[in-house]
Each structure stands twice: as C-alpha cells, then as structure tokens.
Image (spheres, rainbow, N blue to C red):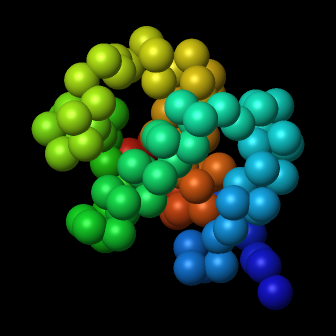
C-alpha cells in the first residue's frame, strides 16, 4: 500500500512507478513531457547514487558533468517544475522531500 507524508511525498521510494508519477504530476497541474521524464530520472539517479537530494547547484552540475545535458539551466528547470525543480521534481519522482527546501 502506498503511503505519503502530510506534504504529499511518497514514503517508500522503491514503490514509485511511472503511472504514479503521472498521477502526482496531474495533481501538481503538470503534463509530463519527455524533458520532464529526463529530469525525473536524473533526480532518481542522483538520489540512488548519493542517497541524498541535491541542491539546485549540485543537480545542475550533475546534469552537465555526469549526464552531459549542458543545454539545461535553472530557468529551464523552473519552467518545467514551477514550484521548484528539486522540491516539486522530488515529489513527482517519488523521492523524499529535500531537507534544504522549505
């Protein structure tokens, strides 16, 4: 059974599915595009690799250096996730709420 925190974050990231991401995105009033999926997968990879949620600066560095997505900047990420690329992205990606986000 899926359980969520009071803020709407999935409590067990291993139970995340793409179908669940679509549902959460709809609740967040976001229609997922290929670019959204790319960022969600990158967030999940970062979390799996480092066991923490990244700051925006660390995530951009990860996107550029590790994934070679050099064409993305913070403004583009905010266009995809208006409530915050890390905060809103984590929710849709089924990851814990970042501790550094309010």
Does residue 7 appear in the picture of this structure? no
- Identify the residue shown where x is 76% and y is 43%: 25
x and y, in percent, of residue 20 in the image: 76, 61
x and y, in percent, of residue 58 in the image: 22, 40
- Identify the residue shown where x is 52% and y is 47%: 40
Instruction: Tell me if 49 is positioned left or right of 86 in this view.
Output: left
> In which image quadrant can residue 48 be found?
bottom left
Residue placed furthest toward the bottom: 1
Instruction: Tell me if 67 is positioned left or right of 39 in this view.
Output: left
- Identify the residue shown where x is 58% and y is 24%: 80
x and y, in percent, of residue 6 in the image: 75, 62
Residue placed furthest toward the left: 65
Total residue callouts: 0
Does residue 66 appear in the picture of this structure? yes
- Seen in the picture, residue 70 relative to 65 is either above or below; the reply is above
- Identify the residue shown where x is 46% and y is 16%: 76
Instruction: Tell me if 68 is positioned left or right of 90 in this view.
Output: left
- Foreground residue among 10 and 76: 76
Instruction: Tell me if 49 is positioned left or right of 75 in this view.
Output: left
- Seen in the picture, residue 80 relative to 36 is either above or below; the reply is above
Residue placed furthest toward the top: 75
- Seen in the picture, residue 102 relative to 18 is either above or below; the reply is above
> In which image quadrant can residue 8 be found?
bottom right
x and y, in percent, of residue 23 in the image: 83, 52
- Foreground residue among 57 and 67: 67
Q: Quadrant of the N terminus?
A: bottom right
């Amino acid at each position: 059974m899926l359980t969520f925190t009071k803020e709407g974050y999935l409590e067990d990231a291993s139970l995340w599915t793409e179908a669940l991401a679509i549902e959460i995105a709809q609740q967040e009033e976001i229609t997922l595009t290929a670019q959204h999926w790319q960022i969600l997968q990158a967030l999940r990879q970062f979390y799996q690799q480092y066991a923490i949620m990244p700051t925006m600066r660390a995530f951009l560095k990860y996107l550029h250096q590790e994934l070679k997505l050099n064409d993305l900047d913070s403004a583009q990420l905010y266009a995809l996730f208006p409530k915050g690329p890390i905060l809103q992205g984590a929710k849709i990606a089924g990851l814990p709420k970042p501790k550094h986000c309010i």
